Amino acid sequence: MSDNETALTLPDGWESVDPPEGVRFLALAPAGGTFRSNITVTAQTNGDLGFRDWQVGSEMAFTEMLPGYTPIDLERLTIAGEEAGRRLAMYDGPGDSALTMEQWFVAIDGIGHTLTATVLTSDYAAWGDQIDRAAATWSPA
């Protein structure tokens, strides 16, 4: 598998598309409305940052970049045998839409890997379990 390929079982009806620069994988939910729900996978160097500092920086960046960013849940996990985590948050999207973001993150050999699902908050109940199942098939490398 190349650096730009990701093995991931997608929610029903979602399709993988060519990702933009800096994104390893992008999948989109069926079209509809002003916002198209999506799953992205990224992998970027963390430099000399440890896991905790990387995530503190991430929270600060979300607060600055995402209007109305509101953390809901943060939990520690183990992914690929490494310290990892999962966050759930809401923020304001385009056209006064409310968005829910669920993100899994792990650092492996100085590379920060993330899987982020962003959906309309009104659709989260419909997609949440399928997104969780998709995340369970994610294997950062």
Image: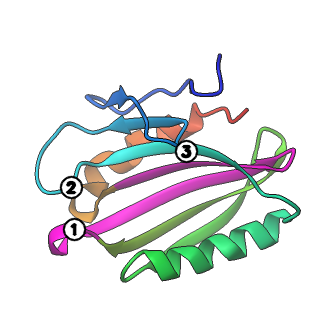
Marker disc for residue 35:
2
Kind of residue at badge 1? Pro
Residue at 54% x, 56% y is 103
**43, 10: nearer the viewer:** 43
Q: How many marks?
A: 3
Q: Is residue 97 above or below residue 37?
A: below
Q: Looking at the image, is mark 1 or mark 3 nearer the viewer?
A: 3
- The residue nearer to you, when weighing 125 against 33, is 33
Left or right side of 19 for 137: right
Q: Contact, CB < 8 Å: mark 2 with mark 1?
A: yes
- Quadrant position of residue 79: top right
Residue 117: image x %, image y %? 43, 50
Return the disc, 2 or 1, that comes first in the chain's sequence. 2
In this picture, which residue range is highlighted in magenta? 93-118
Of the numbered discs 1 and 3, the one sitting upstream in the chain is 3
The reply to whether the magenta stretch includes residue 98 is yes
Q: Amino acid at mark 3?
A: Gly
Q: Amino acid at mark 2?
A: Phe
- Count residues near mark 3 (Cα–Cα under 10 Å), then give few for <14, some for 14-19, many for 20+: few
* Residue depicted at 30% across the width and 31% down the height: 14
Q: Earlier in the sequence, mark 3 or mark 2?
A: 3
Residue holding disc 1: 94
Residue 32's x, y, as percent?
Answer: 12, 46
Q: Which image quarter holds the C terminus?
A: top right
Q: Which residue has dot 3 on it?
A: 22
